[in-house]
């Protein structure tokens, strides 16, 4: 009588396991990419909020902006470089992404009521290509200094 060794997996069982792992991998890759994209967008939102908070500190530390004699809104553009020079914001920490340019600024509007309004524009480049941009400037806003 011959005793057969029944240890191990058959080729069919191994193929089934490989196919199942392939399906799981194929389904999970888009989900992981979505998570990475949401994480990146939340970084930009935090960067946007930090620019606005830095502009608020800038207004508090470096003076009031007066209303002109006509009672119209006064606005000032404070660029990212100025806020960074005053140590009010930190640079955006994303490898190979540069947001330190003239298209990244906060527009500070002082309305006739005396309240301040903050609008932000961010442009981040990866090399020569625009990688991210947000423009929350009002359409009816006058040009600022």
Image (cartoon, rainbow, N blue to C red):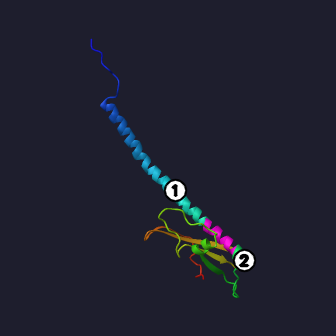
Quarter of the image where the C terminus is located: bottom right
Quadrant occupied by the N terminus: top left
Task: Give the residue number, with chain letter if any, for mark 1.
Answer: 38
**Residue 43, quarter of the rendered image:** bottom right
In the picture, residue 23 is in which quadrant?
top left
- Disc 2 is placed on an element classified as loop
Q: In x, y percent, where is residue 79?
A: 58, 75
Name the side, left or right, on which 23 lies relative to 121: left
Occupied quadrant, residue 75: bottom right
Q: For the residues marked 1 and 2, what is the alpha-carbon distance in whole angstroms?
A: 37 Å
Expressed as whole percent of the image width and height from the top left, the position of residue 136 reads 57, 71
Residue 51, above or below 14: below
Which range of residues does the magenta coloring cover?
50-59
Residue 33: x percent and y percent? Answer: 45, 53
Q: Is residue 91 visible?
A: yes
As for residue 53 lying within the magenta part, the answer is yes
> Which residue shows up at 30% across the image and 31% down it?
11
The residue pinned by badge 2 equals 114
Q: Is residue 19 above or below residue 77?
A: above
């Amino acid at each position: 009588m011959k005793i057969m060794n029944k240890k191990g997996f058959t080729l069919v069982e191994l193929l089934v396991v490989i196919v199942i792992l392939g399906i799981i991998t194929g389904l999970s890759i888009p989900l992981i990419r979505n998570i990475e994209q949401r994480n990146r967008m939340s970084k930009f939102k935090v960067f946007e909020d930090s620019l606005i908070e830095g502009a608020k500190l800038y207004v508090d530390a470096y003076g009031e902006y007066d209303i002109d004699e006509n009672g119209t809104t006064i606005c000032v553009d404070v660029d990212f470089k100025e806020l960074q020079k005053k140590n009010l914001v930190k640079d955006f920490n994303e490898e190979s992404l540069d947001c330190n340019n003239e298209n990244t600024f906060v527009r500070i509007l002082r309305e006739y009521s005396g309240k301040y309004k903050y609008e932000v524009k961010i442009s981040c480049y990866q090399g020569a290509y625009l990688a991210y941009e947000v423009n929350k400037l009002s359409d009816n806003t006058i040009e600022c200094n």
